[in-house]
Image (cartoon, grey):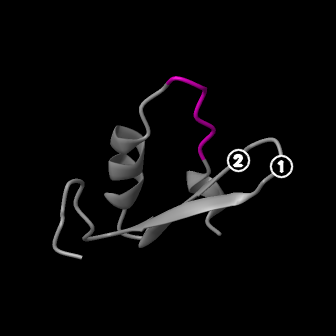
Amino acid sequence: MNYEHNTVVPDQVALEPIIQRLLSHADVATVHVRNLDSQCFMYAVGAGHASGDDSA
């Protein structure tokens, strides 16, 4: 975990631009999205997985 890039996102704020910004850093390959209250893992987004890419 790279604590320098940990980001708290308030409710009702779009995640996609924030995830794209985080993935633009050379030292970030995957962004893990978690619930802030319980710290439950929700999903991960890796570099190279474009939004709307239905090829998977």
Where does label 1 land, which residue? 38
Q: Residue at left 54%, top 62%?
A: 43
Residue 55, by quadrant, is bottom left
Image coordinates for residue 50, horizontal then vertical, percent = 22, 61
Label 1 residue SS: loop
Q: Sort mark 1 into few (<14), some (14-19) or many (20+) by Cα contacts within 10 Å.
A: few
Q: Is residue 5 magenta?
A: no
Q: Residue at left 62%, top 51%?
A: 6
Image coordinates for residue 52, horizontal then vertical, percent = 20, 54
Amino acid of disc 1: Ser
Q: Nearer the viewer, residue 36 or 3?
A: 36
- Residue 35's disc is 2
The residue range painted magenta reads: 7-12
- Calculate the distance from the C-alpha at mark 1 to the C-alpha at mark 2: 6 Å
**Residue situated furthest bottom in the rendering:** 56
Q: Quadrant of the N terminus?
A: bottom right
Residue 42 is left or right of residue 52, and the answer is right
